[in-house]
Image (tube, coloured by chain):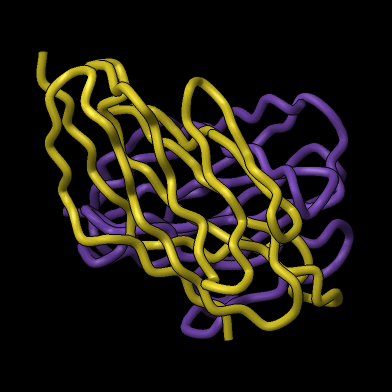
Amino acid sequence: SAVISQKPSRDICQRGTSLTIQCQVDSQVTMMFWYRQQPGQSLTLIATANQGSEATYESGFVIDKFPISRPNLTFSTLTVSNMSPEDSSIYLCSGGQSQETQYFGPGTRLLVL
Amino acid sequence: GNSVTQMEGPVTLSEEAFLTINCTYTATGYPSLFWYVQYPGEGLQLLLKATKADDKGSNKGFEATYRKETTSFHLEKGSVQVSDSAVYFCALSTNAGGTSYGKLTFGQGTILTVHP
């Protein structure tokens, strides 16, 4: 199994600013992903965090808005740039060694005013 | 593309009642199927999974059987408890390879509330 932590756990930000969310895994994982969960909604995949290369973004998400880093097999960051109230969501990272098992972090609750 | 559809919620039950939450899917490739649970204020936890047709996943009294013929993965529990109150998500991933590997597609979630 893998234990995933995220920082910060929550934040309140002003529109136009940026926030970087950190995701730390207690063991090396092959795959890491970032998801968004808007209020009362399901989870939507933002991107696949690729170790040592640019992230792979899903339709509707772009690197300029959600830059992602993954310098090694245990750590990744997601930045939410130039925030607006529509970015208020829970952001979750997940990681795992296989298709069948993905572990999730506790999430970062973001409120943009 | 891949999609997951869950029954409309929320679901409200009395303790010890029988629970069914329906889940159907469409997928390219041969999917693995999952149920995740999100307790109030917490992150997602894997509840159970099944990776091939006719497999039954089970955990904590919950069960779900991978039905390829009906493209379904319904969640059941014979006797729910107050502590089962949470949001339940059905999800799938496919082994299509390349950029699809490991990515999860989620249903919309079903809120379950169990009263004493």
Asked if residue A45 lies left or right of residue B50, the reply is left
The residue under the point 75% across, 40% down is: A75
As displayed, is residue A95 above or below residue B98? above
Q: Position of residue A40 (x, y in %)?
A: 22, 53
As displayed, is residue B18 above or below residue B25? above
Q: Quadrant of the N terminus of chain A?
A: top right
Asked if residue B96 lies left or right of residue B82, the reply is right
Q: Position of residue A79 (x, y in %)?
A: 53, 57
User: Which chain is depicted yellow?
Assistant: B
Q: Position of residue A90 (x, y in %)?
A: 36, 47
Q: Position of residue B1 (x, y in %)?
A: 58, 86
The residue under the point 15% across, 48% down is: B10
Q: Nearer the viewer, residue A54 or A89?
A: A89
Asked if residue A68 lies left or right of residue B85, the reply is right
Q: Quadrant of the C terminus of chain A?
A: bottom left
As displayed, is residue A45 above or below residue A2? below
The image quarter containing residue B54 is: bottom right
User: Which chain is depicted purple?
Assistant: A
As displayed, is residue B111 above or below residue A26? below
